[in-house]
């Protein structure tokens, strides 16, 4: 015996369709709305009759609103910092739109709860009504047939059709009771066979029409609409009443076959959508991996943070262009992508907090450099101080940024000290340069005068004469660079031989004096003893000079690679030359003493 049961197939189709309901359909629809537009859209949902769908839309509007709020936060933090506040004390500005959305959401929650309560109450009331109709039908089945029995059963069937949803847990039981009682009524109906046959012919017409309607669903592109219509037609079929037994199985087979085609078509379309969603999932996983790779290493400066933010925004734009993914993975996929984006905003906030803290430390360091520069700005040792200012400038470059509102102030302070010093130094060099032209003429005059005196060859120079020329030379004023070296070399080439001549003459006089001194010691009562004592003194003096010469000679190697090596080495050589002259003089005296012994 066949049964007209299609409940399992419809349930399977319903699960298939419901499993693919996509919240991101609304997400794509709302992704480009501003906060103001989101509020307007949310307000319009309050007036809609379909509370379930409207609630899904509202949830997505709320999610999109929160995404915009998160995206606005970095700029708000920057504005907070630029206003001179500490990032660690950041307080989001009051957002009236956020409060408004929350009010709408709370209103909708109440509407949703009221709608749910009303629907449950309506279903329970419908269950009571249908049970009452079952009791009426049962009474008709158990009672004797009358002329009005068929009319009464038709009224019951009409009332039954007019009652819609009942609680799901009672649907199968109530439907089975209804069909069994109707079939039993018609099976027992015998007195008015003609009326019974006429009624079954009308039921047949209804069912044939339902078959046509099901077959017409082949042209419906929206699989959800097709399922809803098919479900309704099956409800109408159950409520239509029996047909003649000889065609009952055949008419059911036609209806079931048409329904199977629609369900197979729904499954085929759904399978195609499933494949598309799988493809979309693969694309979105690629974007997720890119986002996760981008946030795996955090930037260290503001420019790179901006660059990373742009990269993530571009990935989000690509995300919105890709269609839905399998519903089972929808939230997981979205949450994974959103986690990468949220981690960016969170870490960026932390970075700017630390940056602001570092900016305050940097400000302290730059204030210290300003104070050092201000202490040096009036120094007169221009070369050494200039080097110190260069060192301060290098330190300044190594210090990071300071709070925005202090940046220009602290730089101007630092620059003012620099400008003050370098203006003084430039002025000093200008003044010295103007004086130098007169100094060159003065030195040339000294050289000319000395040349004239030497040329006469009549002058017997004394040390006093030469010291007078040397004093005039030293007091002739400052001359720099190559000009000084040229004039100084010419002057020294003139005066050095004159000094040497006087020294040679002085050495001869000193030698005579030492000889007389030794003769006097030798003629004294203890002359030999005094001469030996003088010998020891001279040897010790010579030894000390030799040690001093050796020390200076060793020190020369340490300065060979220094910045001013030539000048330093010349000073050492001049010193050694003088010490050697002293040593030779002492040796000459020692020779006189030893001859006397």
Image: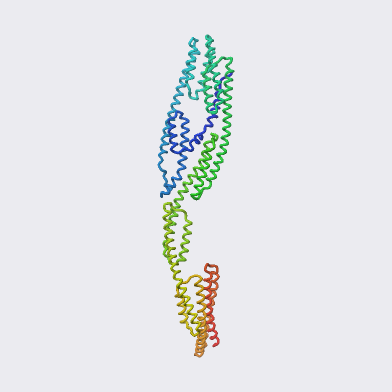
Q: Is residue 554 above or below residue 366?
A: below
The answer to which of 327 and 259 lies nearer the viewer is: 259
Q: Is residue 384 above or below residue 195?
A: below
Figure disc tally: 0
**Quadrant location of the N terminus in the rendered image:** top right
Picture coordinates of residue 364, whole percent (x, y):
43, 56
Picture coordinates of residue 56, whole percent (x, y):
48, 33
Picture coordinates of residue 258, whole percent (x, y):
58, 22
The answer to which of 285 and 167 lies nearer the viewer is: 285
- Res 468 quadrant in image: bottom left
Q: Is residue 104 above or below residue 147?
A: below
Picture coordinates of residue 155, whole percent (x, y):
48, 15
The answer to which of 551 and 531 lies nearer the viewer is: 551
Which residue sits at x=46%, y=57%? Answer: 396
**Quadrant location of the C terminus in the rendered image:** bottom right
Q: Is residue 207 above or below residue 333?
A: above
């Amino acid at each position: 015996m066949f049964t007209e049961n299609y409940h399992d197939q419809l349930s399977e189709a319903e699960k298939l369709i419901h499993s693919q309901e996509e919240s991101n359909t609304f997400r794509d629809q709302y992704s480009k709305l501003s906060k103001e537009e989101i509020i307007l859209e949310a307000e319009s949902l309050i007036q809609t009759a379909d509370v379930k769908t409207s609630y899904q839309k509202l949830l997505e509007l709320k999610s999109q609103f929160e995404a915009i709020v998160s995206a606005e936060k970095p700029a708000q933090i920057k504005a907070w910092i630029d206003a001179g506040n500490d990032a660690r004390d950041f307080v989001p500005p009051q957002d009236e739109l956020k409060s408004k959305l929350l009010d709408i959401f709370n209103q909708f929650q109440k509407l949703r709860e009221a709608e749910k309560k009303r629907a449950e109450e309506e279903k329970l009331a419908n269950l009571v009504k249908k049970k009452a109709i079952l009791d009426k039908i049962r009474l008709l089945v158990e009672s004797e047939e009358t002329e009005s029995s068929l009319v009464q059963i038709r009224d019951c069937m009409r009332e039954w059709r007019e009652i819609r949803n009942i609680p799901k847990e009672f649907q199968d039981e109530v439907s089975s009771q209804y069909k069994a009682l109707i079939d039993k009524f018609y099976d027992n109906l015998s007195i008015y066979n003609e009326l019974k046959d006429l009624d079954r012919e009308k039921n047949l017409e209804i069912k044939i029409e339902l078959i046509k309607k099901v077959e017409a669903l082949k042209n419906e592109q929206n699989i959800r609409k097709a399922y809803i219509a098919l479900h309704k037609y099956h409800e109408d079929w159950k409520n239509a009443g029996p047909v003649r037994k000889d065609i009952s199985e055949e008419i059911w087979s036609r209806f079931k076959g048409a329904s199977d085609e629609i369900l197979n078509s729904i499954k085929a379309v759904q399978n195609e959508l499933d494949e598309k969603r799988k493809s979309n999932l693969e694309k979105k996983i690629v974007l997720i991996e890119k986002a996760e790779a981008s946030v795996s290493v955090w930037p260290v400066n503001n420019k790179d943070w901006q660059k990373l933010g742009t990269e993530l925004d571009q990935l989000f734009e690509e995300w919105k262009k890709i269609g839905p993914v399998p519903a089972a993975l929808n939230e997981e996929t979205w949450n994974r992508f959103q986690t990468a984006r949220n981690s960016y905003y969170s870490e960026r906030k932390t970075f700017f907090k630390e940056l602001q803290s570092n900016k305050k430390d940097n400000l302290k360091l730059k204030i210290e450099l300003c104070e050092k520069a201000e202490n040096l700005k009036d120094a007169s040792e221009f070369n050494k101080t200039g080097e110190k200012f260069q060192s301060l400038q290098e330190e300044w470059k190594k210090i990071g940024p300071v709070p925005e509102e202090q940046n220009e102030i602290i730089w101007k302070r630092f620059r003012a000290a620099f400008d003050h010093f370098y203006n003084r130094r430039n002025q000093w060099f200008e003044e010295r340069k103007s004086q130098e032209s007169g100094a060159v003429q003065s030195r040339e005059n000294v050289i000319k005068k000395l040349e004239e005196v030497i040329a006469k060859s009549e002058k017997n120079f004394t040390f006093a004469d030469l010291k007078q020329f040397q004093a005039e030379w030293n007091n002739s004023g400052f001359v720099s660079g190559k000009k000084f070296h040229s004039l100084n070399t010419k002057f020294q080439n003139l005066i050095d031989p004159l000094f040497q001549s006087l020294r040679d003459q002085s050495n001869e006089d000193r030698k005579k004096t030492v000889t007389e001194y030794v003769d006097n010691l030798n003629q004294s009562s203890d002359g030999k003893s005094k001469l030996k004592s003088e010998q020891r003194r001279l040897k010790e003096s010579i030894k000390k000079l030799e040690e001093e010469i050796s020390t200076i000679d060793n020190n020369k190697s340490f300065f060979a690679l220094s910045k001013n090596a030539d000048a330093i080495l010349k000073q050492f050589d001049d010193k050694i030359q003088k010490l050697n002259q002293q040593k030779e003089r002492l040796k000459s005296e020692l020779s006189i003493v030893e001859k006397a012994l």
